Image: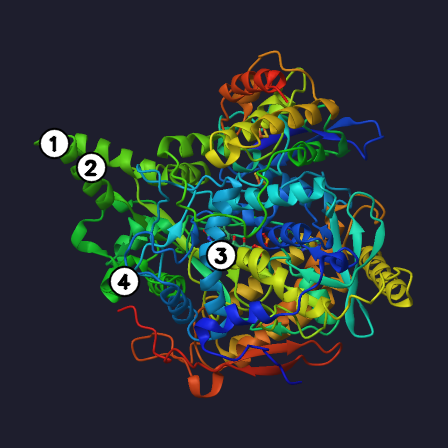
Amino acid sequence: MQLTLKVWRQKNGNAQGRFEHHNIEAEEHMSFLEMLDVLNEKLISEKKEPVAFEHDCREGICGACSMVINGRPHGPQTGTTTCQLHMRAYKSGDTITIEPFRANSFPVIKDLVVDRSSFDRIIQAGGYISVNTGQAPDGNTIPVEKDQASDAFDSATCIGCGACVAACPNGSAMLFTSAKVNHLEQLPQGKVEHNRRVKDMVKQMDKEGFGKCSNVGACSVECPKEISVENIAALNRHYLSSVFVKK
Amino acid sequence: MKLDSKVPEGPLAEKWTKYRGSMNLVAPNNKRRLEVIIVGTGLAGASAAATMGELGYNVKAFTFHDSPRRAHSIAAQGGINAAKNYQNDGDSVYRLFYDTIKGGDYRSREANVHRLAECSTEIIDQAVAQGVPFAREYGGLLANRSFGGVQVSRTFYARGQTGQQLLIGAYSALSRQISLGNVKMYNRHEMLDLVLVDGKARGIITRNLLTGELEKHAAHCVVLATGGYGNVFYLSTNAMGCNVSAAWRAVKKGALMANPCFTQIHPTCIPVSGEYQSKLTLMSESLRNDGRVWVPKKLEDAKAIQEGKKTGLDIPEEDRDYYLERRYPAFGNLVPRDVASRAAKTATDEGKGVVRTGLGVYLDFADAIDRYGKAAAHSKGIDNPTSSQILELGEEVVSQKYGNLFQMYEKITGENPYKQPMKIYPAVHYTMGGIWVDYNLETNIPGLFALGEANFSDHGANRLGASALMQGLADGYFVIPYTIGQFLSNEIRTPKFDNNLPEFNAAEKDTRTRIERLMSVNGNQSVESFHRKLGKIMWEYCGMSRNAEGLTKGIKLIQELREEFYKDVFVPGDQNEFNPELEKAIRVEDFLEMGEVMMRDALDRNESCGGHFREEYRSEEGEAKRNDEDYTYVAAWEWKEGGQPQVHKEELTFENVELKTRSYK
Ligand SMILES: Cc1cc2nc3c(=O)[nH]c(=O)nc-3n(C[C@H](O)[C@H](O)[C@H](O)COP(=O)(O)OP(=O)(O)OC[C@H]3O[C@@H](n4cnc5c(N)ncnc54)[C@H](O)[C@@H]3O)c2cc1C
Ligand code: SF4
Ligand code: FES
């Protein structure tokens, strides 16, 4: 199939960016990233600089790939990362626009690569259970109800990609943060530090410059792991009660 | 060179406990003065960094990723083994030890493997305490499943994302230590050289991947947890960034590369679809619990399928060859990986493959769907279920068990595996070989340690499913935090190292020269194209089956490719900026040497064992034939710049298990 690509090129964080047009021949069984590999091989053969984009596992789990395809983070399919998208979703003659995730808290590094280290700092603020190695009791000491473990898992499946932020008109990180809070809160082991965790993580999120959540819901629609907006509602409740909890 | 494994004296089951109780300790106030560099923050590195931070060491941790959470460990699907015996099915530490030794075809060190089995139970406890949402039974207790090559149910799992959940557990523990100031984290930093001072490992040279700046980092010792080198084959199930560079740089500084030819080829991966293929996707081994592997009995059927004139559904039952069940009745579809992979190759070599390229076999769930459907109908009180009811109920059960895998398969291939049998083929998956380490996980360079997939220690010639996560975490949480004291307790009076020592400046200069050389070739071929060529040579001559003639040829081809690389590679961009092509070029340069050592090792080992199958050494039935008389040793290779690599041997002694022919018949 013949495609026209409109790709964002930006030399570095300080440089001006612009769209570059390329015509390219692709096959339907290729993944989207393999299609970009083909483009890059072509550019290299012309002694030009390839398009920088982030990727690693290429199977939808590491959270590295991050691009906005025709206006949508991770492209058109629900529950799918960019690396899992295949070219059979397109037809010959299509024009595809490819941009980086855009958000104040995700500065562009080069072309389609952005800096998402703000997510790490939110986790460092409290996205853990304080247990040192060797302190743990036997794994079966505290039973966890099957459905509850499963709900915790649903929140824990976040891959930290940042599509939620890129999808949000306010650039809010509420879906990411709430998923972590709820993953831990739904397990007995995580309840102990819950109040402190909520306050500290929300504080860090604000400090990183992420926008406020106004319940648009685009985050969850674009989330490749289909993290539910209910996480956000739960976090709002937790936050209120953690603020009013007596010290 | 004499390789001393430093295995402690005493009965096998008591070695670790006694040793741990008598090891040298470092007092808390001294720990604060000691600096430890950890390269790699996957399961092994993150767990080590977190634990050593908790203990009070000054830890500096490095990853080339933008965050520790992206390490390749994140991709592990199936699960993690532990000898908990929660299922009361006769499991024990000894049985896990025995299965691992046998699964590894008697080419691993008894004492290390036993320690691994001992630590396995603590890992589960630790992970649960960190909030890892393992699968549970209705009663709220932890659930288990069985995995290839064993007959007990000891695998703990979190749907099909066990690696993700375990890594997030380790990452959160690491994040906590970062926030407490005990660990300083360097993301997007790639180690490009190891620095030795007076023969001991005292630091590393890194490249800041954002700016291209070379940095010198000093410490009292260096721990490598940099993962496996499966990407030497270009196509593998490893993430795109997996590489051998950190390990290889250590080898260039005198460390030994042990059993490099022991590569695991995983039987259940999605077949290659075209030349543009960039990586291969694993379909978890757990699928073999319910899927049945087959090819058509008749060549003409296979041909028709390859040409797209027939599908698997057109082949009647009596014309299907369920070859694993036929050849290995005791284990059937659950034979270990190496056996299953070779059997697939045998079938496709006969021309019975079921994809366009001929390189694919079926993994069929129709029987499982039928069986589960009938059982579900029964438990729902439906007396005479119709076949469509059975199908619907059965698909529901299968979807609960493997839903995400089926979905992943459909995304990649565009085919619905509930309706059409899956197509699979073996692919490179894991490297049992790695840096040689002793019982303390210390290499032959004092002060240099290696953990996780980067070392060679526990899996012999073949790794059992769900044992890599176990090993990475055992090494990181429960072994290195203690054994490193054996080295560091002698260093408490050693002041901090200055990174302006001549050794550091020289290593930095060498690295700069190396990068400039790559940038200045300015040839006509991309890095990727060299990597692809190398991968083809490796797969052809050092893949699922090997022979002396092919290996000899392969070595020559790699040497020629290496020469061509330095004449004609093209690395675009600048070295002083974010430049992914340069990163790749450096890694491929190292693969080009590593590949040769793998071939030499394969050529030297005149036997078939585990993942290493030499065509010259097989039984009349075509099964692998070991040679215990001559090859019960670890082959540890020393790189000689400009000359031939040299092998050093660590004899393996088995005091507790009897060496047997591995039989899964
Ligand atoms: C698809 C797939 C599925 C798997 N499923 C299972 C399973 O179900 N059960 C199981 O037990 N095992 C499984 N495995 C194997 C297992 O996942 C790995 O062996 C294990 O996770 C390796 O962990 P590690 O910590 O040693 O290395 P990795 O997780 O690979 O981490 C390596 C780290 O080193 C860093 N690094 C590397 N080189 C450098 C450098 N030069 N400078 C700086 N940093 C560097 C990386 O950034 C990364 O942080 C699977 C593997 C694959 C490919
Ligand atoms: S919540 Fe979803 S979109 Fe946001 S980081 Fe996690 S996986 Fe990505
Ligand atoms: S590359 Fe890992 S999620 Fe896309």
SS for dot 3: helix
**Mark found first going from the N terminus, 2 or 4:** 4
Q: Relative to A203, is B421 above or below? A: below
For label 1, count other residues whose C-alpha is less than 10 Å away and answer few (under 14), some (14-19) or many (20+). Answer: some
Residue furthest front as drawn = A247
Q: Position of residue B412 (x, y in %)?
A: 46, 40
- In the rendered image, which quarter is residue B514 located in? bottom right
Q: Secondary structure at mark 4?
A: loop
Ligand 3, by image quadrant, is top right
Quick check: do tags 2 and 1 share a chain?
A: yes
Above or below — where is B525 with respect to B387?
Answer: below
Instruction: Please give the name of the residue rendered at 18% of the width and 51% of the height, measured from the top-left corner.
Output: B317
Kindly identify which numbered label has been placed on residue B119.
Answer: none
Which residue carries the number 2 mark?
Answer: B373
**Residue B331, label in figure:** 4
Q: Rounded to the nearest whole Å, what is the CA distance between mark 3 and mark 2? A: 34 Å
As drawn, the label of residue B385 is 1
Q: Which mark is residue B470?
A: 3
Q: Could you give the CA–CA distance between mark 1 and mark 3, rounded to whole angstroms?
A: 43 Å
Callout 2, which amino acid? Answer: Gly
Same chain assignment for discs 1 and 4: yes
Q: Position of residue B607 (x, y in %)?
A: 45, 80
Specify which label sits upstream in the sequence, 1 or 4: 4
CA–CA distance in space, label 2 to label 1: 9 Å
Taking depth in this image into account, of B369 and B171 the one nearest to the observer is B171
The answer as to whether the residues below labels 1 and 3 share one chain is: yes
What amino acid type is highlighted by mark number 4?
Phe
Closer to the N terminus: mark 1 or mark 3? 1
